[in-house]
Amino acid sequence: MQKPLLQSWLLYCRPGFEQDCAQEALRQAKQQKPIIGTEQPAIISDSGYVVVSLNEQKLSWRELIFTRQLVRLHHNIDTLPERDRLTPILDAIATLPGTFGTLWLEAPDTNEGKLLATFTRRFQPLLETALREQGRLKDDIKLPRLHIFFPDKNSVLIGSSDPHNSADAIMGIVRQSMPPEAPSRSTMKLAEAIEVFMDRSEQTRLLRQGMQAVDLGAAPGGWTWQLVKRGIRVTAVDNGPMKGALDNHPLAQHPFVQHLRQDGFKYAPRKAADWLVCDMVDKPSKVAKLIEEWFVAGWCKHAIFNLKLPMKQRVAALDSALGGIRKRLDEEGINHRMMAKQLYHDRDEVTVFLTRTKH
């Protein structure tokens, strides 16, 4: 009997969520067919990445919540010679077919990985020049990307990603800078979510000036500010003051903002809004139920919300919360699209985008 062919995948994730990342990926694969003939590689805690081995199963980056980036792994070099790291990497790349449109040198999103930034910056032009001379690297975003991932200076994982099935950002991280005038750092979560979940045309269509939004749990105003700067009028609902103790922050008097000191879980709008955003700290099941009610009541068309994760059984808690929303909206005949990701600016939470669709 022929031994099943194995294909390894390299997945980047938030440090500390390796088990969740691997669990979710293996489950997605097993839903297609059983994984035969392999023991899974060891998971390294707090490493910021995992490797999984599959047969012919396909992984979908968009459907993996804890996976920042999805890379098909081709080579693993455990020991790089200190005096010549370039040659063994070029030799390994030479065995790969085709050409590549982008070269990304990456390291884990850990304190140790950050120390490799100087090394990768120096190494990048050496490798890039050699690959261009060999005709292996061309400036074409439609071609596969080549990933050179350094867990440390002495080892490397070499892989490629499909531009249609991966994150369009190095390390899978859509970084945001903190605007000095924003009320809180949470504004970067919503900014990142908009970039990750919506392409440019969808942003233009769904985030138009003059739209109406409701921000539940708005204080101190980071998410409200993100919407207001796009010309959207916001009803900010929170018992707490905008901008912490400083209720005289310009956002509180902004003509586009109405601040209602009410409980976000009990608030009911007088008329429907275009958007609902919600970053309240509570059980994921409770927040999910709230979102369901807003969509079923017709109070919003689109939503971005956070689900705070428990310490244990995080995948199960998410399955229950997101599955509950899908089931309820299906029962009510509400066509929808939903996508969830643990974003770079998230911590122990996951961000969800939910929108009504015509079909």
Image: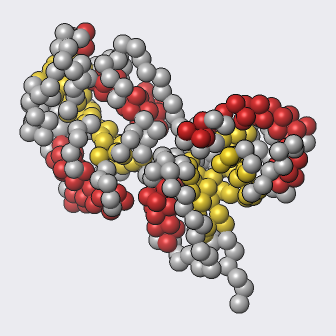
Q: Quadrant of residue 130?
A: top right
Residue 159, can we see it?
Answer: yes
Give the residue drawn at x 10%, y 34%. Answer: 263
Q: Is residue 45 left or right of residue 226?
A: right
Give the residue drawn at x 54%, y 41%. Answer: 110
Give the residue drawn at x 42%, y 35%. Answer: 345
Residue 311, x across and y down, in percent: 32, 54
- Residue sitting nearer the eye, 316 or 277: 316
Residue 171, can we see it?
Answer: no
- Residue sitting nearer the eye, 152 or 345: 152
Q: Is residue 28 left or right of residue 210?
A: right
Residue 346, x across and y down, in percent: 39, 39
**Quadrant of the rendering where the N terminus is positioned:** bottom right
Q: Quadrant of residue 216?
A: top left
Give the residue drawn at x 52%, y 34%. Answer: 174
Residue 329, x across and y down, in percent: 24, 54
Q: Is residue 35 left or right of residue 194?
A: right
- Residue sitting nearer the eye, 213 or 156: 156
Residue 70, x across and y down, in percent: 58, 52
Image vertical order of residue 309 relative to residue 34, above or below: above
Image vertical order of residue 255 relative to residue 339, above or below: above
Image vertical order of residue 207 relative to residue 49, above or below: above
Q: How is the image coloured?
A: secondary structure
